Amino acid sequence: MDAEKKETYYEIRPKLTFSLNLNELIEYKELFYFFTWRDVKVKYKQAALGFLWAILQPLVMMVIFTFFIGKTMNMPSDEMEYPVFAFSGLILWTLFSSGLTNAGNSMVSNAQIIKKIYFPRLVIPISSILVSVFDFLIAFFVMIVLLVFFQQPVDFFRAIVYWPMGLVIAIIATFGPGCLLAALNVKYRDFRYVIPFLVQALLFLTPVIYPISIVSGNWLKYLLAVNPMYAAITLFRMPMMNAAPDALLIWISLCSGAVFFIIGLIYFRQTEGYFADLA
Amino acid sequence: MKPILEIQSVSKKFKIHHEGMPYLSLRNRLSELVQFQASRKSKEEFWALNDISFSVMPGESIGIIGKNGAGKSTLLKILSKITPPTSGKIIGRGRIASLLEVGTGFHPELTGRENVYLNGSILGMRKREIDSKFDEIVDFAGTEKFLDTPLKHYSSGMQLRLAFAVAAFLEPEILVIDEVLAVGDAEFQKKCLGKMEDVSNSGRTILFVSHAMSAIESLCKRSILLTGGKISLMGSSSDVIEHYMNLVYDGSSGHVGSILLHQDKPANLLRKIEIFCDGKISTTAYMGCRLEIRVHFKSKNLLDSPVLGVIIKDSQNVPMLGINNKHYVSNLASQPIREGYISMTIPHLTLFEGIYHVDIHFGNAFKDIEVLRDCFQITIEPMKFTPSGEMPDKRINRLFIKDVVWMLNNTN
């Protein structure tokens, strides 16, 4: 018995150097599940429409954009039916915007727990992003229905590769800024006002309701591609598109996502020790 | 054997912002940059802990006592990794769990069952562990019937019981507890204390912060007294508690044994309370001594028949004695009185050794005019009163009777 028992040894020191401490995150893997599960339950528990809310928001947005932008402005849509084009962009966008908002506010809204108990703090913003992923998966099935309804041709093999790829990139793109905002929000409560504004502004800077091909001027295209969600949405639409996207734009967007990911992660890790003192 | 916890010159510094804001705002930070050093003055450094060192052996229970703001909670927060120390380090050799609050993470919208899982998981239990202990937890809390009711419909007592039940089934090697006993009714507190004794007896290490000296004394052999972020005394719990009680008295107004009441408020009736033990002014008495309590008063109106009531309670707030002069004499005053004192004398104090709190009720024949709860403490020292020199167990005695007659009758 005693031989089996692993010798526990740890040191608590002032936090000076950066460490990812992935082992600890793995040790607490069940907590991701419980926090996500809590937020999903609480979100839908008293809502009469329940999970329909996950579908309703992108669906209504799609109808509005289809009517006003697709029909009246004759917006091109990369050879897709405009509703499919808009909806596929919108569900990924909703993942990003709600994930960013929830993650950004997560440390402050869980302040009571943070002040009283230790666990790797990253669990909190990650779980709040996972709640948005859960909503996305529900909305994704609606997208499949729409694809059938509009008889949109879909390349099956591309779908297997690009749909998960788009999702993973979107999660990474949400994680970086999400963690950054979460940490900043603890220190400077100003960010609680910045987040909704940021999300709203970014919607128009992301090719969700318009294709990037309508943007004239190369430098403007490259600037828009700095948005990490550009790659996620473009790759996610690949199975429904015939044309190949501009690889350079995708790479710019991927690199920007990676940079944000690293900045967000490092800043969060560097400041998390003091969350309990400030929250 | 190596210590399970080694605390090596740990210090913690806080910066106090005098704008009265608990957090920073970006605007302040920006304006600080512009104003160069001008606003630096508004920040003040504060050492919540200053060079704390001690070690804890496996299976040991240590009490941490001190006045509010002495750094007790900060120390526990550092031990439980919630906040890092500014300098120094801690070496740990066992799984640690901290209970700075019961019911951390409880969510009112979730059911009792769901909250048990959520709370258990936040406290560091594995899902499998919770599964296997679930029935015991619910049984301990006594909330079986409401398992699938949202927590918001629970009474606060039920919430507390459920929260403590989850915490009670934690099985870490080191348990850090902060003032958990400060909540709940007497019965609940007793249950908590009993559970903690079980934990301690099962060979686990406990670090325990509390203001309930009796709880510390019964649970911890060794205690640490923190004063202003430093360890001012470390030793056996009874010594440390005694020292602490003296310290508390130095901080209060007046001499030991004499308590001045708000004399600046003319509306107040009571002026001063004096405690005498065998004629000497002191709040430290001993078993069997002659205890006198004098309550000085000054009234605007004439009082027909002043009445003094005294309630003496033990350290767990259980009343031991509650008497007033009407029980003994119908009227103390031969004529109406404006100023003076009433004295109550117990010729032979029959309270057992320990710490007692006293409530003072003062009024006329019909009602209380002024009530002072817990207005002072009396420490009663042990006194060998039996010829054999052996003392009864102080954990189960609150009273002692000197002349007990024992007899063995042989009926054979």
Image (cartoon, rainbow, N blue to C red):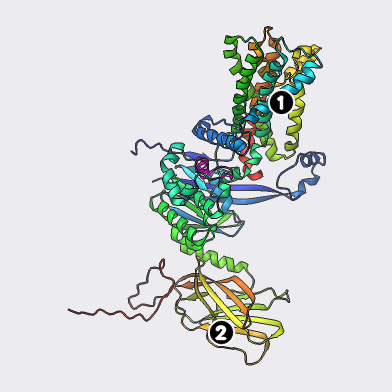
Position of residue A196 in the picture relative to residue B400 (left or right): right
Discs 1 and 2 lie in a common subunit: no
Tell which of B245 and B89 is nearer to you: B245
Q: Chain of mark 1?
A: A
Residue under label 2, please give it. B326
Please say if B236 is above or below B102: below
**Could you tell me residue A62's position as x and y percent?**
72, 22
Position of residue B299 in the picture relative to residue A13 (left or right): right
- Tell me the amino acid under the disc marked 2: Lys
Position of residue A225 in the picture relative to residue B392 (left or right): right
**Could you tell me residue B8's position as x and y percent?**
52, 46
Please say if A122 is above or below B248: above
> How many numbered circles are shown?
2
Residue under label 1, please give it. A60
**Could you tell me residue B2's position as x and y percent?**
41, 45
Q: Quadrant of residue B134?
A: top left
Please say if B86 is above or below B271: above
Disc 1 from disc 2: Cα separation: 79 Å
Q: Specify start and end residues of the magenta stretch as a single range.
A: B105-124
Point out the image quarter for the C terminus of chain A. top right
* B113 magenta-colored: yes
